[in-house]
């Protein structure tokens, strides 16, 4: 199948597919005489795997590591578990940061009522200090 069909089947854009190829997540493919890329079922499966990883906010580096681990099916999965534990911790840290940000924004919002002028705006005054 050509790249447009691969994009349609997987729900990835053509630009994303080309980017993953450039980043060596998708291997180089065969080309037709007209220089069109040709993809097979393995490319579909790999792209869907990458897409699922990205939906979990895994980095390209983490995806590369997972792909390398997948090539050793008999190995223990402790490295995969450690990677997921580290990613969970990153998510928890980000949630904590976003929770703190929300508190700060709400405090800022409470510092100004709608019936003030811009000159009296508590939000702008707090941002200035």
Image (cartoon, rainbow, N blue to C red):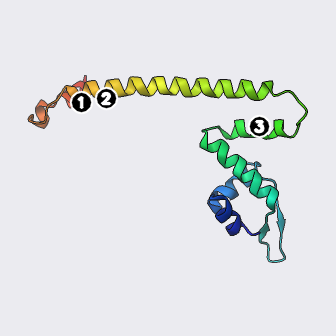
Whether the residues at callouts 1 and 2 have beta carbons within 8 Å, the answer is yes
Residues at marks 3 and 1, CA–CA distance in whole angstroms: 43 Å
Quadrant in which the N terminus is drawn: bottom right
Judge from the rendering whether residue 71 lies leftward or rightward of residue 86; answer left or right: right
Inspect this view and state whether residue 127 appears. Answer: no
User: What's the residue at 12%, 33% (across, down)?
Assistant: 119
Q: Helix, strand or loop at disc 1?
A: helix
Answer above or below: position of 88 versus 118.
above
Inspect this view and state whether residue 32 appears. Answer: yes
Judge from the rendering whether residue 15 lies leftward or rightward of residue 123; answer left or right: right
Q: Helix, strand or loop at disc 2?
A: helix
Residue that numbered label 2 is attached to: 105
Q: Residue furthest bottom?
A: 34
Residue neighbourhood size for the residue with mark 2, other residues' Cα within 10 Å, grouped as few (<14), some (14–19), many (≥20): few
Q: Helix, strand or loop at disc 3?
A: helix
Q: Quadrant of residue 122?
A: top left
Residues at marks 3 and 2, CA–CA distance in whole angstroms: 38 Å
Q: Which mark is residue 66?
A: 3
Residue that numbered label 1 is attached to: 109
User: What's the residue at 70%, 47% (across, down)?
Assistant: 50
Answer above or below: position of 99 versus 67.
above
């Amino acid at each position: 199948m050509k790249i447009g069909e691969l994009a349609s089947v997987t729900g990835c854009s053509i630009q994303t597919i080309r980017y993953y190829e450039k980043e060596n997540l998708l291997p180089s493919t065969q080309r037709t005489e007209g220089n069109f890329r040709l993809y097979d079922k393995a490319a579909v499966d790999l792209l869907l795997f990458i897409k699922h990883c990205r939906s979990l906010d895994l980095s390209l580096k983490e995806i590369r590591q997972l792909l390398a681990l997948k090539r050793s099916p008999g190995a223990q999965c402790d490295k995969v578990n450690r990677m997921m534990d580290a990613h969970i911790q990153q998510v928890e840290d980000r949630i904590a940061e976003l929770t703190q940000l929300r508190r700060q924004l709400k405090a800022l919002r409470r510092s100004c009522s709608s019936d003030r002028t811009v000159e009296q705006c508590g939000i702008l005054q707090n941002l200035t200090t």
